[in-house]
Amino acid sequence: MNDPIEQLRGFQRRLLEKVRSEHDRLGAVTDDHCLLSDDVFNDLSLELTSLQSKANPHFAAQVEQSNQGRSLLYHWKNITAISTHAFKALDWTCLPASDRTRVFHSSGTTGSETSKHWHSDTSLELYEELLLRWFHEHPPWNLKQFLVKECVFLTPEPSRVPHSSLVHMFSTIAKDLPQEVVHRFAGQLGRDGNWDLPMEQTIQELDGLKHPVCLFGTAFLYVHLLDYLESKGQQLSLPEGSMVFETGGYKGKSREIPKEHLYKQLAVKLGVEKRHFICEYGMSELSSQAYDAQIDPGNLSTFGATPRRFQFPPWARCRVISPETGLEVGYGETGMIHVIDLANIWSCLSVLTEDVAIRHKEGFEVIGRSADAGPRGCSLMSDDFV
């Protein structure tokens, strides 16, 4: 079988088989998960690099250039990091044009060019299954102890924003909810293309809830909600057990608030305990998501201003690397987020983001967007593809 597309389909089948068999064996992600083994992850990463190089000549050229004359790559940490700028400059995909049934765009800052991550029916099946498997590992999604009775997504309906990977994720979660849990999308799409909330109606509905609810929204939507409540001199008291799911940044769409300050204000204004906040880190160019976890302060490394640490699922790895050297920084040091995502079978497994983080033993702590969207040395700029 020499057809690279068929080989990629075979890789997807084998990856899913591994994930499913490990779940059947373990029941959950534990330290014994086979994909946490560096040897297993390394073999799969190098195989996928080879397959993607056959299907995407742009990737092949960058791998060859970064390999600096070595005959073979020997470790996943040496796979060239492809900047998210590549997804803006080109259709960075292994999918034939005839198979491209869906495209996700990055939200971007106002007036900026957006990324394009192409999908097919096959790639979306992979994306949705792995999304839900990792999502189920985080509270309150243990269905044996499911306390939330309603989910309110503060974004527009999926049909209104078909190119948003975030809303597609929310839609996938909504379809997977237990039958007794009701849900709705409360957001609207403005004429300018921005997402809005009908504040008065949303607040009235939240204020009338009798059972625990989980709110799903972006940081900038929560800031707009806080600003409205502040302007009206109001605050809510959501039913005990309610939760807040927060994701995404600000991207110039609102004033920016440090994460812990945002959570503190939301806890006060919504009446939700801070231990019931969960934050997700993802982007349109990736197929896997990272979730934060509250780390016991007594077990924290000595660095970092917050006890929240992000972790990717076993089929992905995150490195925090120096923008000057491309090498991984030490614990407590700051660098750019580089993700190796095996679920990115049909685009590029090695993605260099524009986000800055602190590296920790327990995971990584997101600081924000880079002031320089084009780090040197380890990234690929749009000009490289002209």
Image (spheres, helix red, strand yellow):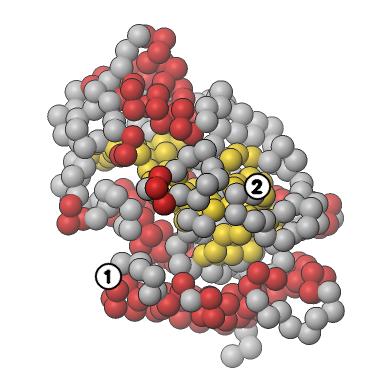
Q: Residues within 10 Å of mark 2 (few under 14, many from 20)?
A: many
- Residue at (54, 64) in percent of width and height: 317
Label 1: which residue? 27
**Snapshot quadrant of residue 271:** top left
Position in image of residue 66 (x %, y %): 79, 69
- The residue lying at 51 percent from left, 80 percent from top is 40
Q: Tell me, yes or no, if residue 143 can be seen here.
A: yes
The disc, 2 or 1, on the residue closer to the chain's N-terminal end is: 1
Residue 141, percent across and down?
27, 52
For the point 55% across and 57% down, the residue is 286
Q: Disc 2 marks which residue?
A: 334
Q: Residue 50: image x %, image y %?
A: 66, 79
The answer to whether 233 is drawn above or below residue 243 in the figure is: above
Q: In the rendered view of the protein, which quadrant contains the C terminus?
A: bottom right
Mark in front: 2 vs 1:
2
Amino acid type assigned to the residue bearing label 1 in the image = Gly
Q: Amino acid at mark 2?
A: Thr
- Residue at position x 39%, y 74% from top? 33
Quarter that holds the N terminus = bottom right
Q: Nearer the viewer, residue 158 or 358?
A: 358
From the viewer's perspective, tell me whether residue 225 is left or right of residue 317: left
Q: CA distance from mark 2 to mark 1?
A: 35 Å
Q: Nearer the viewer, residue 11 or 290?
A: 290
Give the structural element (helix, strand or loop) at label 1. Answer: loop
The 10 Å Cα crowd at callout 1, few under 14, some 14 to 19, many 20 or more, is few
Q: Is any atom of residue 128 visible in this view? A: no
Which element is circle 2 on?
strand
Looking at this rendering, what residue extends furthest in the bottom direction? 1
- Pick the front one: 119 or 150: 150
> Is 363 on the left-hand or right-hand side of 324?
left
Tell me where residue 20 appears, x and y as whole percent: 35, 74
